Every structure is written in C-alpha cells, then in structure tokens.
Image (cartoon, rainbow, N blue to C red):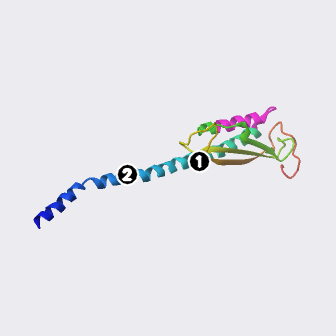
Amino acid sequence: MRAQVRRRLWRSREDSGNALIEFTWLAVLLMVPVGYLVVSVFQVQRAAFGVTQATREAGRAYVAAGGDNPEDAALAAARLALQDQGLQLDPDDLTISCSEDPCLTAGAIVSIRIDTRVGLPFVPHIFGTVPASIAVHGRHDEVVDCFRSGVAAPVDAGVCP
C-alpha cells in the first residue's frame, strides 16, 4: 500500500511546472491575435481621424484662399493634416465640388471629399499593391463667406443679407 502511495506521489511530482508552460502557451496563442486586432483598429482609427481633419482643413483653406488657384491651397492643407497622422495623400484621393459657378461665389457651398485606403499592419506589399486594406472616407462642406473681399456677388439674395 505504501509503495502505491509513493508511486502516485512521485508521478504527481513529475508534472510540476507543466501548468506554467501550458498557461504561457495559451496566453501567447490568445494575446497575439488580440494584440494584432488592437493595432489594426488603432491604425484605422488614426486614418479616419486624419481624413476627417484633412477634409475640414482643405475646405477652410479653399474658401479662405486668395489668388487664382484655391485647389493648391486645399491640397496643401489636406496633405499637412494627413502628415500629422503619418499618412500620405495622393492628389487623386481629393475631390472638390461646388454648388455654384464660379466656386467662390458668396454663399456657395464647397464640398471636399477624401477617399483613401489604409493597409493593415504587418501585411506585406506584394507587387506594389496593398493586399489587405480598409477604405476610409471623409467629407466636409464649407460655405463661402458672404462678406469676404474678392468674392463674387451672391447668386440668391436670400443666402446672404
């Protein structure tokens, strides 16, 4: 009887430390995907914040720009806002549309839209393309000030006093 008890005690001592190893492997197997998910969500959130900020700043720069080319001012403002978030802006991603012609007519609405894609982290670029990405869109409407100097007269008398 004592021999059986000794064998059982000896076998239980052989398993010492296995729980720590099993817990470590289980933690690694669960924490790596959760960590990747958190990093991916933060990457997309950063891009969404940057695009929202870029559309707002591009709209403001467009309606406040003096001179012949407000598109360049809007593009520069959008690029700067996205660079603050570590992103790059392709000029084809920026779309500017106006409710009136000419665009800077007093009371006109200028719409700025940015459509871009954010690559998922740690996914390799194959043949120069982003294999896994998420689309991020931003839109902002800015009204041309009625009392700004150098702006064409309002089209509709009800828009501006």
Question: Within 10 angstroms of label 2, few (less than 14), some, or many (20 or more) residues?
Answer: few
Compared with 151, 38 (above or below) is below
Q: What stretch is highlighted in magenta?
A: 64-81
Kindly identify the amino acid type of the residue bearing the numbered disc 2: Trp
Q: In this view, does 157 lie to the left or right of 133?
A: right
Can you give x and y, in whole percent of width and height, for residue 74 in the image?
73, 37
Q: Can residue 140 be seen in this view?
A: yes
Can you give x and y, in whole percent of width and height, for residue 23 in the image?
34, 54
Q: Which mark is residue 44?
A: 1
Q: Which residue lies furthest to the left in this view?
A: 2
Q: Is residue 8 left or right of residue 149?
A: left
The residue pinned by badge 2 equals 25
At mark 1, the secondary structure is: helix
Along the line of sight, which residue is nearer the eye, 86 or 161? 86
Residue at 53% x, 42% y: name it: 122
Q: In this view, does 78 lie to the left or right of 125?
A: right
Spatial CA span between label 1 and label 2: 29 Å
Q: Does the magenta stretch include residue 76?
A: yes
Can you give x and y, in whole percent of width and height, for residue 139 in the image?
71, 48
Magenta region's main secondary structure?
Answer: helix
Residues at circles 1 and 2 in contact by the CB criterion of under 8 Å? no
Q: Which mark is residue 35?
A: none
Image quarter in which the N terminus is found? bottom left
Q: Residue furthest top?
A: 67
N-terminal-most mark, 1 or 2: 2
Question: Within 10 angstroms of label 1, few (less than 14), some, or many (20 or more) residues?
Answer: many
* Residue 62, quarter of the rendered image: top right
Residue at 62% x, 41% y: name it: 130
